[in-house]
């Protein structure tokens, strides 16, 4: 009798193995140890990549001159080059990478498919089309205002969701419809570009492949302010999306407003992707790679919003620095990510097939 009673009152520890319960009176918090350690490690990687990117250049500036420029002890030209050109560009790259990483994480989780990223389902193409349309008839070759990117992204997302019949569990429909919309918008954009003069087409082409060239605090400051608002909201959305990863009915039973969470998460993803594309152009594969890498690092228990942001920031900074040193002429960051992203996409596809075969 005693043993049965003891067994009945025993409580089962359901704390995830990678977490610690922190209690303060009647309040408790599930602290994700593994995710926190990965975040610290990724922050250190970003610091290292930023330091390397500060003196990465096709002009082969010596490391000592770069340090002098950072400290302000070098000549005026060196200080201006490092502080006014390189550092803002690196900062913008980190912010753009974080935005793309989070956008990819949210869209992949919503659609339940690792291929459902903003650059594949038409969101990035909508943002690109809006910015390119603003230069029609221009003779300067300068791209339009960055805030046109979010507007085009919203238009493309609305079109995809309406054609797919919603953004619910049928992620494959969102993916297929998104590919179709992306192809259509891309074709229209190419048609518009083909009708422009060589000066305009040549000036905009560099941006359409994804480039941080000329990005400074003029776009970095508003981007930082936008992320200061959207990133905390994305963290909250990711926390709620964890309850929807198995079944909408289960999420509803846990008190989650399924439609509201999905709508807010999609809106956040579209806004983040649109802002990133409006500023740096449609940089490919970062929104695909960052969440996949972050999920491998942090484990499958959570939606890796923060990990995706840090991974995306590191990828952009590293790719941009690499593009400045691997050739005599600077290679745009979008070209570097595309070259590296092709093999990564094959790895994702083969990895998915292998996982499906084993299960």
Image (spheres, helix red, strand yellow):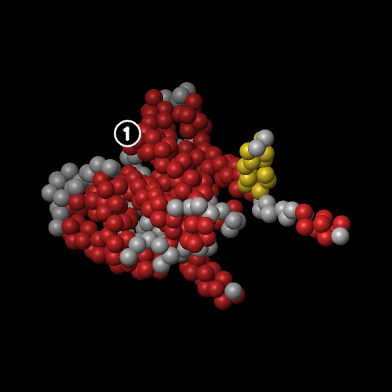
Vertically, is 221 above or below 306? above
* Position of the N terminus by quadrant: bottom right
Nearest the eye: 281 or 245: 245
| Residue ranking furthest to the right | 2
Residue 325 visible in the shown view: no
Q: Is 359 left or right of 337, judged from the image as shown?
A: right
Residue 15 visible in the shown view: yes
Nearest the eye: 233 or 58: 233
* Image location of residue 323, percent across then percent down: 42, 50
* Image location of residue 105, percent across then percent down: 46, 54
Nearest the eye: 105 or 129: 105
- Total marks placed: 1
Vertically, is 178 above or below 314? below
Q: Secondary structure at mark 1?
A: helix
Which residue is rendered at x = 26% and y = 54% of the image? 155
| Residue ranking furthest to the front | 1
Which residue is rendered at x = 29% and y = 65% of the image? 163
* Image location of residue 224, percent across then percent down: 40, 36
Q: Is 91 left or right of 126, judged from the image as shown?
A: right
Which residue is rendered at x = 43% and y = 37% of the image? 228
Nearest the eye: 125 or 159: 159
| Residue ranking furthest to the bottom | 357
Label 1 belongs to which residue? 218
Q: Quadrant of residue 92?
A: top left
Vertically, is 353 above or below 307? below
* Image location of residue 79, percent across then percent down: 42, 28
């Amino acid at each position: 009798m005693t043993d049965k009673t003891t067994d009945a009152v025993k409580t089962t520890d359901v704390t995830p193995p990678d977490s610690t319960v922190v209690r303060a009176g009647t309040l408790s918090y599930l602290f994700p140890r593994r995710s926190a350690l990965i975040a610290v490690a990724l922050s250190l990687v970003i610091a290292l990549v930023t330091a390397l990117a500060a003196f990465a250049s096709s002009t082969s500036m010596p490391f000592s001159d770069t340090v002098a420029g950072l400290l302000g002890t070098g000549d005026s030209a060196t200080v201006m080059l490092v502080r006014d050109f390189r550092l803002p560009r690196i900062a913008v790259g980190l912010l753009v990478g974080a935005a793309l990483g989070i956008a990819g994480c949210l869209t992949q989780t919503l659609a339940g498919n690792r291929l459902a990223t903003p650059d594949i389902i038409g969101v990035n193409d909508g943002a690109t089309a809006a910015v390119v349309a603003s230069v029609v008839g221009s003779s300067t070759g300068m791209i339009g205002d960055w805030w046109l990117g979010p507007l085009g992204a919203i238009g493309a997302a609305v079109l995809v969701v309406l054609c797919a019949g919603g953004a619910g569990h049928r992620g494959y429909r969102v993916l297929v419809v998104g590919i179709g919309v992306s192809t259509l918008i891309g074709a229209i954009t190419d048609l518009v570009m083909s009708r422009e003069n060589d000066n305009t087409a040549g000036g905009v082409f560099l941006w359409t492949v994804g480039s941080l060239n000329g990005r400074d605090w003029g776009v970095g400051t508003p981007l930082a302010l936008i992320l200061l608002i959207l990133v905390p909201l994305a963290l909250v959305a990711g926390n709620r999306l964890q309850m929807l990863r198995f079944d909408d009915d289960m999420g509803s039973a846990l008190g989650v407003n399924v439609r509201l969470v999905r709508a807010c998460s999609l809106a956040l993803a579209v806004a983040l992707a649109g802002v990133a594309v409006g500023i740096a152009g449609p940089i490919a594969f970062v929104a695909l790679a960052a969440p996949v890498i972050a999920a491998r690092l942090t484990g499958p228990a959570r939606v890796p919003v923060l990990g995706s942001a840090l991974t995306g920031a590191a990828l952009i900074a590293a790719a941009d620095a690499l593009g400045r040193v691997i050739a005599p002429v600077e290679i745009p960051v979008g070209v570097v990510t595309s070259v590296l992203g092709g093999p990564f996409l094959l790895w994702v596809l083969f990895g998915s097939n292998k996982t499906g075969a084993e299960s």
